[in-house]
Amino acid sequence: MSELRQRQAQAPKDSSESPSEPRSKSNKSSSNENSISVLDIIRLLVTLVVASCGLSYYITSSESLLWGYRPWFTKWPLVVRYIQGPIFLTPEQLSLYNGTDPNLPIYLALNGTIFDVSANPRIYGPGGMYGFFAGRDAARAFVTGCFEDDLTSDLAGVEEMFIPIDDEDSEEEKKLTKAQKKIRRERDVRLAKAEVRKHVEHWQNFYRDHKKYFEVGKVVGQMVVDGGKRELCDAAKSKRPKRNDQDVDRKD
């Protein structure tokens, strides 16, 4: 009888312990099923990237997988130029890259910086709308807009097109002393030269950031004009502001 009582006393203890093991195992398996693994996150990110690229390719009419963004290393000609390093050409050597030789790329230069525009031979090649820019540095024409007279890198005196024309008959002009006019002239020249630099940098950035064009090197041995200044072309002269108009704009 004593043995039977001992067995009965131990039975609940044993029965309470035995079910606990399968419960713990089931809890672990359910927690594993509910958790998100790193592999799942990677799969989700890859799916989103692929979907974004596909949508970009469709919306941009098969032009870009990155919504118009094109890193420099995706442009093969630019990668080749990066590996080979920048080129240095004299004006005479640069003139050979005007599109007449099919074995050579088409280059144009802007204030000493050379850009490859071979991607658009219809525009910059022989007979193209801007074919006269190819094979030369025509920085002055980019500023003045005189494509026939100013196909040169000489920027000397081009700031005159941004200097206001004085009205000698105005009362305000007559009140100014020679010293005041000299100070005003120095200020006008300083601002005008800054405007020229702004125009040149604008066009340099246009070619440098263009999706089809890229910078390849520099022009060396370019002649620097000493002393004399080129006369402004008619188109540039017509763009000069008048002193009275400029003063009104400043007051507004």
Image (spheres, rainbow, N blue to C red):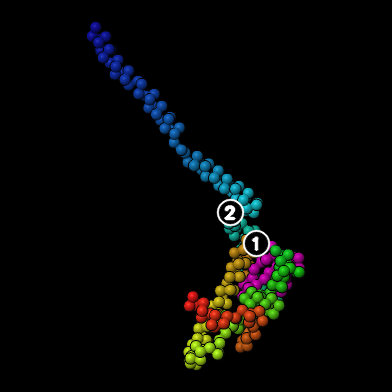
Looking at the figure, which quarter contains the N terminus?
A: top left
Counting residues from the N terminus, which is met first, the one under dot 2 or under dot 1? 2
For the point 76% across and 65% down, the residue is 102
Residue 212 has which mark? 1
Residue drawn at x 60%, y 67% as measured from the top left:
206
What's the magenta region?
A: 93-119
Q: Is residue 102 magenta?
A: yes
Label 1 is placed on what type of residue?
Lys
Q: Are marks 2 and 1 in contact (CB under 8 Å)?
A: no
The relative height of residue 75 versus residue 142 in the rendered view (above or below) is above
Q: Which residue is mark 2?
A: 67
- Residue density around tag 1, few if under 14, some if 14–19, many if 20 or more, within 10 Å: some
Looking at the image, residue 121 lies above or below residue 23: below
Front: mark 2 or 1: 2
Closer-to-camera residue (215/148): 148
- Of residues 179 and 10, the one nearer the viewer is 179
Q: Mark 1: which secondary structure?
A: loop
Q: Is residue 152 visible?
A: no
Q: Position of residue 58 (x, y in %)?
A: 63, 49
Mark 2 to mark 1: distance in Å?
Answer: 16 Å
Is residue 50 depicted above or below 33 in this figure? Answer: below
**Which residue sits at x=35%, y=20%?**
18
Give residue 227's position: percent from left, percent from top. 61, 88
Q: Position of residue 208 (x, y in %)?
A: 60, 66
